[in-house]
Each structure stands twice: as structure tokens, then as C-alpha cells.
């Protein structure tokens, strides 16, 4: 039985899944860092605005 | 029988791939625009600089919707040392605004496009007088704002 097609497709799909996982993890990491920096900036802004926020 | 299965399998794989890639693409666009907003707007160091400029304001009157000044004509709004201060801080323009939404929707030609983009990120519901400072580092406009 010819198994060459199965093996090559398995390799292709494995790389595809790895690529998707890599991109998703990178994006979620960026998003996480972005949220941390955004939180810091918001808290600084709120603190500086406190006495003017009537 | 087998040809039919291969066809359906191909369709399914294509559908799943397209769905995944469209999701990834939209996620990437959202995150990259968020990162740009965080990169150029309301940096912590810029916010503290705005706080210093705000504390040195001697005239907080806004004529019309918006008043603006820079290091060349700042003596009306700040003390006599303002030219050096604003230059040292790389503050290219200072805007005093009564109402963000009014300025954002106005057809005032003096408002730069980059400024309009920044105004979109400020909470539109706020009705405070606001000081917005445009900083210029490496020929890029950075904005930060506080209430006055």
C-alpha cells in the first residue's frame, strides 16, 4: 500500500498547526504586554488627573 | 466513493484554514493598532511632562474651542522661561481644549490629522478642560493629555 501521500500530508499539517500555534501565542503575548503597559498608563493618568477631576 | 471523500475532506480543510486565518488576521490588526496607540499616545514619561507644563500654566483661558501655543509664543500662557522648557521637553505644540468632541468634529484646518487620531482615543464623554501636548521625537508626533 502506498503510504507516501499520507506521510507527506501529515508533515504539512503538523507544520501548519505549529505555525498557527506560534502565531497565536505571539499575538496573545503582545496583547498581554499591551494590557500591562496600558494599565500602568491609565493609573498614572488617573492619579495625575485626580485633583482636577471634579 | 474515495474521490467523493477526498473532495469533502479538501473542502473541510479549506474551510477550517480560512476560518483560522481570518481570525488570526483580524486579531493581528486589532493588536497592532492597540500597540501603535500605546506607543505614541499617553506615554508615562510624557504624562509627567504634561503635568509639569500644566503646573506652570499662568493662563488657562481657552479662546473659542481650542487655544494652542508653542515654544515661540508661549509667554502669554506660561512664565518667561517657557521657551527653553518646551524646547528641552521636545514639546512642539500645546493645545488647551474646552470640549474634546467639539474640537474633534470641527472643521478647523489648524488641527493636524495625527491630532484628530489622538482625540479619537480620548474619552469623548468627558467635559473637562484638557491640555494636550504634542511631543516630537525623531520626527514622530507623540501625544499626551491631562485635565486642567
Image: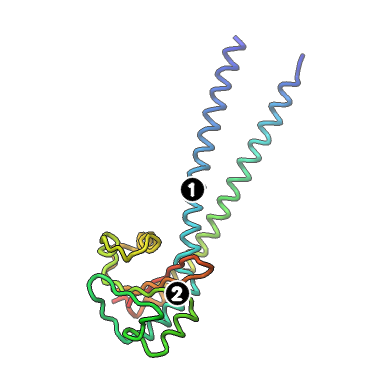
Q: Chain of mark 1?
A: B
Residue A3 position within the rendered picture, expressed as x and y whole percent measured from the top left: 75, 19
**B120 lies above or below B83:** above
**Considering depth in this image, is A37 or B129 the residue closer to the camera?**
B129
Q: Position of residue B101 (x, y in %)?
A: 27, 63
Q: Is residue B56 above or below residue B35?
A: below
Pinpoint residue A7: horizontal percent, then vertical percent.
Answer: 74, 25
Front in this rendered view, residue B6 or B80: B80
- For mark 2, does the 10 Å Cα neighbourhood hold few (<14), some (14 to 19), or many (20 or more) residues? many
Q: Which mark is residue B47?
A: 2
Badge 1 and badge 2 in a common chain: yes
Choose top left, top right, bottom left or bottom right for residue A45.
Answer: bottom left
**Pointer 2 chain:** B
- Which mark is on residue B29? 1
Residue farthest toward the top in the current orientation of the protein: B1
Residue A16 or residue B81, whichever sits in front: B81
Amino acid at each position: 500500500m502506498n503510504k507516501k501521500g499520507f506521510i507527506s500530508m501529515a508533515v504539512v499539517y503538523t507544520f501548519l498547526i505549529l505555525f498557527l500555534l506560534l502565531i497565536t501565542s505571539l499575538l496573545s503575548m503582545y496583547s498581554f504586554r499591551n494590557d500591562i503597559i496600558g494599565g500602568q498608563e491609565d493609573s498614572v493618568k488617573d492619579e495625575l488627573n485626580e485633583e482636577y477631576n471634579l | 466513493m474515495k474521490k467523493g471523500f477526498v473532495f469533502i475532506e479538501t473542502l473541510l480543510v479549506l474551510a477550517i484554514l480560512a476560518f483560522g486565518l481570518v481570525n488570526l488576521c483580524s486579531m493581528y490588526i486589532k493588536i497592532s493598532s492597540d500597540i501603535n496607540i500605546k506607543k505614541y499616545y499617553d506615554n508615562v514619561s510624557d504624562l509627567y511632562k504634561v503635568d509639569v507644563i500644566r503646573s506652570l500654566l499662568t493662563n488657562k483661558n481657552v479662546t473659542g474651542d481650542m487655544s494652542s501655543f508653542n515654544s515661540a509664543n508661549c509667554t502669554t500662557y506660561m512664565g518667561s522661561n517657557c521657551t527653553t522648557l518646551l524646547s528641552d521637553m521636545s514639546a512642539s505644540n500645546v493645545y488647551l481644549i474646552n470640549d474634546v468632541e467639539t474640537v474633534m468634529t470641527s472643521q478647523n484646518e489648524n488641527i493636524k490629522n495625527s491630532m484628530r487620531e489622538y482625540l479619537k482615543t480620548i474619552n469623548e464623554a468627558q467635559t473637562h478642560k484638557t491640555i494636550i501636548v504634542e511631543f516630537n521625537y525623531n520626527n514622530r508626533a507623540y501625544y499626551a493629555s491631562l485635565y486642567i
